[in-house]
């Protein structure tokens, strides 16, 4: 019992724990959603800012490329150069071309050199036709790739050209070549190729990450993912591979991982600008928010636990009071009424328990009183049994005297009376078999025949299938009695006939009592109580009594019909369902 009580005491802790767990999970979900929404909003804003920064960088580089396009246009549209390139080029004309190109180089500080080639790719600049500069031209793979590609213009990768490695020892590829076809402006025919070598630093002098706080690294890549320019923060671990590789999108932000953004250059679509932003940029922004959310969540959890503890105590307190009341009751004592002032469902619980104990006490008092009355009644019944036994023994003695005097008719009559007397003194069962009812009627007929000799004749037929079926006790006998007293005997004529028939159908049994007596007005016995009194049979059982018992025993599933005409006789018809069975 102590162990069970210990388990019962845990209900308050269970309620507190379960409610707190539910609230904790709810708060956790809310906090995760808030944190996710905050991160999503910051990422969206980051993407907007990053793309704007990329657009600014693209515009700066596009502006420099436009300047190169202007230089190209000026060179190609130069009328003197157009004339020289249109004719057969001699040594004199080559020197003139070289002089013109040198002037353009002087005019544009960002330009390292301008070179022109014929349609077969042979350099026209005099100096670069001689060793060791001829080797620089012949070994320049990007130039020959452009000539073989058939493209109109193209930018090379960062290169050493036009420096001579034998003279200028350096590994820094600080130049970029701008290849293009040289077109005759009048005939639109290609007369050769033009190469402008310019300084890489000039093109990307505004390509500076220090002014863009969001990016960890910036790069310019060509169509083959070759690095054209690269700039990163001092602490960045970004490499060419990280810039080239596809960044997998993850629902979780990780320290040291990057977001990747890129955009194509408008003036030269073969190049694209790529920027990397560290996850740390967003994590730094969300750390304060996450910390505040955790603090709020922790405070909410403590508050929730406290509230749940108070609520669970309020819920379980009346339950403990009810349990204590039942424990007192188990010890065979009456518990005091439970006091509980709440207005919720627990008040109904305690009120119901109080009413239950009041009701139990009332029932026990009534049961005690009933027991005392039953004891007194049993004593009375034991005393009352003396008289019926005395009468029964007396009738047995009279039957013996009649047999000793060899008066068998009187002895048979007394025996029938004794049978009916015993049957009426067994109130425990309200029903018996059809066979027993017919036997009861036979004994009654013997008594009436002895009393009214030659006044009537009686006939009875019973289908054997009905013998063991049940019906209410004394259902048919009063009707036979009525047929005798209020039918054939009331007519004051000889030759009265009474017949009783019991027939079996599928699930019904039908009984018919017919007499040729005086008859009566059926409407009167149905409407007038005083008429019913005059049509009572054995034991003062009247027709209305029979109808009432049929109603109680069979509900509405019966037929009780009386047909009678004055001086013509009476027919009583009963149709009832088959119920019960007893071997007879």
Image: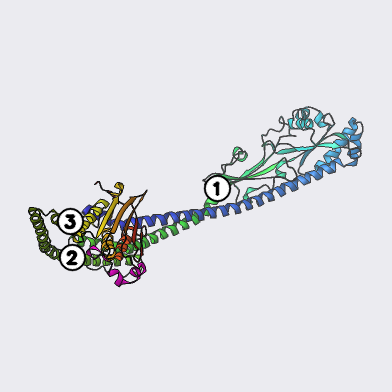
Which residue is under mark 1? 279
**Residue 105 % position (x, y):** 80, 41
- The quadrant holding residue 134 is top right
Q: Looking at this view, name the residue that lies furthest to the front.
A: 494
Task: Look at 21% across and 66% down and name the residue there.
Answer: 361
Q: Is residue 222 visible?
A: yes
How many numbered marks, from 0 up?
3
Between 60 and 408, the one nearer to me in the picture: 408
Of badges 2 and 3, the one in the foreground is 3
Please tell me which of labels 1 and 3 falls first in the chain.
Answer: 1
The residue that disc 2 covers is 370
Residue depicted at 72% across the width and 46% down the height? 61
Residue 327 sits above or below residue 528 on the image: above
Picture layout, residue 257 above or below residue 36: above
**Residue in the image at 78% along x and 27% along y:** 131
Residue identified by numbered label 3: 416
Q: Earlier in the sequence, mark 1 or mark 2?
A: 1
Q: Residues within 10 Å of mark 1 (few under 14, many from 20)?
A: some
Residue 532, image quadrant = bottom left
Q: Which residues are magenta?
A: 521-540
Q: Are marks 1 and 3 in contact (CB under 8 Å)?
A: no
C-alpha distance separating marks 1 and 2: 88 Å
Q: Position of residue 333 (x, y in %)?
A: 18, 64
The answer to whether residue 5 is left or right of residue 64 is: left
Could you tell me which secondary element the residue under label 1 belongs to?
helix
């Amino acid at each position: 019992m102590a162990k069970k009580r210990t388990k019962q005491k845990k209900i308050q802790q269970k309620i507190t724990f379960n409610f707190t767990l539910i609230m904790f999970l709810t708060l956790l979900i809310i906090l995760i959603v808030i944190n996710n929404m905050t991160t999503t909003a910051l990422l969206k804003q980051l993407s907007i800012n990053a793309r704007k920064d990329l657009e600014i960088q693209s515009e700066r580089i596009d502006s420099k490329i436009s300047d190169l396009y202007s230089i190209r246009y000026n060179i190609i549209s130069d009328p003197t150069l157009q004339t020289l390139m249109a004719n057969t080029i001699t040594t004199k004309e080559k020197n003139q071309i070289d002089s013109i190109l040198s002037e353009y180089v002087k005019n544009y500080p960002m330009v390292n050199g301008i070179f022109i080639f014929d349609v077969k790719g042979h350099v026209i600049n005099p100096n670069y036709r001689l060793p060791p500069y001829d080797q620089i031209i012949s070994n320049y793979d990007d130039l020959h790739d452009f000539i073989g590609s058939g493209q109109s213009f193209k930018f090379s990768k960062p290169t050493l050209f036009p420096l001579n490695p034998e003279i200028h020892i350096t590994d820094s590829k600080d130049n970029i070549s701008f290849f293009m076809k040289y077109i005759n402006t009048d005939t639109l025919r290609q007369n050769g190729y033009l190469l402008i070598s310019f300084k890489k630093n000039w093109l990307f002098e505004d390509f500076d990450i220090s002014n863009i706080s969001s990016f960890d690294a910036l790069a310019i890549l060509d169509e083959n993912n070759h690095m054209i320019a690269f700039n990163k923060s001092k602490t960045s671990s970004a490499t060419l591979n990280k810039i080239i590789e596809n960044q997998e999108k993850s629902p979780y932000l990780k320290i040291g991982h990057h977001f990747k953004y890129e955009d194509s250059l408008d003036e030269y679509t073969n190049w694209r600008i790529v920027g990397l932003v560290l996850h740390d940029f967003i994590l730094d922004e969300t750390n304060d928010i996450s910390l505040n959310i955790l603090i709020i969540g922790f405070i909410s959890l403590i508050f929730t636990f406290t509230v749940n503890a108070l609520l669970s105590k309020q819920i379980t307190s009346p339950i403990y009071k009810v349990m204590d009341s039942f424990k007192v009751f188990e010890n065979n004592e009456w518990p005091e009424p439970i006091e509980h002032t709440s207005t919720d469902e627990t008040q109904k619980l305690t009120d119901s328990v109080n009413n239950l104990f009041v009701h139990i006490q009332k029932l026990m008092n009534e049961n005690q009183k009933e027991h005392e009355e039953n004891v007194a009644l049993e004593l009375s019944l034991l005393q009352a049994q003396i008289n019926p036994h005395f009468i029964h023994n007396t009738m047995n003695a009279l039957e013996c005297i009649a047999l000793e005097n060899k008066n068998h008719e009187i002895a048979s009559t007394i025996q029938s009376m004794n049978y009916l007397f015993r049957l009426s003194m067994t109130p425990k069962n309200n029903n018996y078999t059809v066979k027993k009812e017919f036997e009861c009627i036979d004994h009654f007929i013997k008594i009436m025949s002895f009393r009214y000799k030659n006044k009537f004749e009686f006939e009875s037929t019973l289908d054997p299938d009905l013998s063991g079926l049940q019906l209410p006790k004394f259902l048919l006998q009063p009707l036979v009695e009525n047929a005798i007293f209020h039918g054939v005997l009331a007519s004051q004529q000889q030759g009265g006939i009474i017949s009783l028939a019991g027939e079996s159908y599928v699930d019904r049994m039908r009984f018919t009592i017919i007499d040729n007596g005086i008859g009566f007005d059926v409407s009167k016995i149905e409407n007038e109580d005083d008429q019913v009194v005059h049509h009572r049979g054995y034991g003062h059982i009247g027709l209305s009594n029979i109808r009432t018992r049929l109603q109680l025993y069979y509900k509405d599933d019966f037929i009780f019909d009386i047909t009678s005409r004055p001086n013509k006789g009476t027919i009583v018809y009963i149709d009832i369902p088959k119920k019960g069975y007893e071997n007879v």
